[in-house]
Amino acid sequence: MSETATDTEALAISTEVLIVGAGPAGLLLAAELRLAGVDTIVIERHARRPDFCRGFNLNARALDLLARRGLADRFVSEGWQVPNAPVSGLPVTFHLAGTHTDHPFTLGIPQTRVEEVLEAHAVSLGADIRRGHELRALHQVDQSVSATIATDAGEYRVRAAYLAGCDGGRSTVRKLAGIDFPGTAATRHTLLGDVELTDPAALPFGATDGPGGTVFAIPRPGYVRIITADQDPPADKDTPVPLSLLQNAVDTALGRHVELRAARWLTRFGDAARQAAEYVRGRIVLAGDAAHIHPPAGAIGVNVALDDAFNLGWKLAATVRGTAPTGLLASYHTERHAAGARVLANTRAQVLLAQADSQLRPLVDLLTRVAKHPAGNRAFVETVTGLDTRYDMLPDADHPWLGRLCPNLALATDTGATDLATFLTPGRALLLDLAEGSGISESARGWEDRVDVVRATCPEHPELRAVLVRPDGHIAWLQTTVHDHTDGIRQALERWFGPALQTAGLPAG
Ligand SMILES: Cc1cc2nc3c(=O)[nH]c(=O)nc-3n(C[C@H](O)[C@H](O)[C@H](O)COP(=O)(O)OP(=O)(O)OC[C@H]3O[C@@H](n4cnc5c(N)ncnc54)[C@H](O)[C@@H]3O)c2cc1C
């Protein structure tokens, strides 16, 4: 018997959010949604996580964000700390000491391990993660999105209030949703091989220049990652890379034979830079590589994917719950599209600097001098790592912290010493009332269901009277001087969390 469309929809599994892709973006988004109590299914086409590992770091910004959910220490305890940021293109060491971060280092840790921890976290919060399930089709129906999913056992449908495409650079979601992906095509391709060297002494770690090019050798646990230019890439960039091709490229670049063996992963990647024109289209949202691809300079992809998920999670949860003010979900596009555009520009700049021909030499020399100056060094680092991320907030307080990630303030409360991150762990907004008797807490009456109000003191920053922190840790409003705060705080609360519950007419207290 043939099914009508209505029958098929009636048979579909229902969920509030369907996430496509269990990479860093999808897994963290799932955890953020579950923190807010949103029903979440994640589908991942691979039955198992691949044997190879792409990324190997969490940067200072990502660690600061993860710390707002109590997750950073778990990674820090396993990884290795490098006090610099991986910026390419200039002969300068980029120091993280003295920058705006609680984690002044780059953490070496395999992306696969980051995903394992995030997956366990999401599952512990109740996310339904389905491996070996691939998105094949989607369409928006009435107030929902319907997705067709293929498994070895056949196809099924999921009907979701929202669908999040966290499915990587070649995103099926982005394509099926018809979202444009403008940018620049790859002009250069690079070969990558995770291999062993028959003679480990034959090639030092780092960059080795030869008569035909440069070969990078990066130490990895039990193997070496070899990277060198792909001088003659095939028209179909998905053509498998045999070890002989990489061997030949290495020998040609160095002008001598350095034997490679025991390949674990061989691939090629390009320097295309593209960004989705819309991060939100109706009930479909994009995050991570699905929303932006860029050259690998600066090792930032995992970190930006996590940043997107942090920004999106609470906004999507409030939208699903029906408590979001107008424009909240759209602000995900506004804030993260701008941040993504900076990542594309920064990574492209690093590639250009690394390839600069003699005509651009004066530019490289100038930037090198700037980057060697302590203030220039710091500005470079904060820009390329995203530590300088600042979102537009209502301009009633002119403070350098407004819109930025709130530092992890040390706080004293009636119950003892604590810090800001501890209060953000549940993923809710926070109003810190740091001026006893100011009446700031009372101004938030009507938002208690969405905003936690904490009375505390902050001995390190006695000038702070109140701070409103969004669930993603960014400061939406703050006050340092004694003046009437009522309009400012209520405007900020309404802008980010919707109108106050109707308490008018009820007796106070
Ligand atoms: C060689 C290399 C080295 C890198 N090194 C670094 C580094 O050192 N540091 C860093 O920060 N970044 C690095 N990156 C970038 C980083 O790996 C990516 O930016 C990051 O994985 C993006 O995360 P994501 O969650 O957006 O997408 P992905 O990790 O790509 O996850 C997308 C998931 O969606 C799944 N999927 C796709 N289509 C479907 C479908 N139709 N149905 C169901 N599931 C689907 C995929 O199987 C995949 O698991 C590197 C990348 C490469 C290629």
Image (spheres, grey):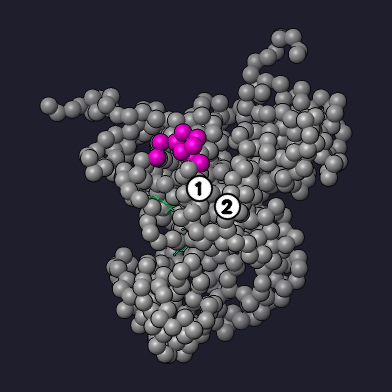
Residue 276 visible to the viewer: no
The quadrant the C terminus occupies is top right
Return the residue nearer the eye: 208 or 480: 208
Q: Which residues are magenta?
A: 121-129
- Which of the 4 quarters of the picture holds residue 332? top right
Which dot marks residue 117?
A: 1
Which of 443/109 is in front?
109
Q: Residue at x 37, y 67 (%)?
A: 264
Residue 89 position (above or below residue 103): below
* Type of amino acid at the residue the image marks with label 1: Val
Q: Residue furthest left?
A: 1
Residue 449, percent from left and from top:
62, 23
Quarter of the image where one finds residue 143: top left
| Picture quarter with ligand 1 | bottom left
Whether label 2 touches label 1, CB < 8 Å: yes
Q: Amino acid at mark 2?
A: Phe
Q: Which residue is pictured at 29% across the width and 40% down the height?
A: 149
Q: Which residue is mark 2?
A: 75
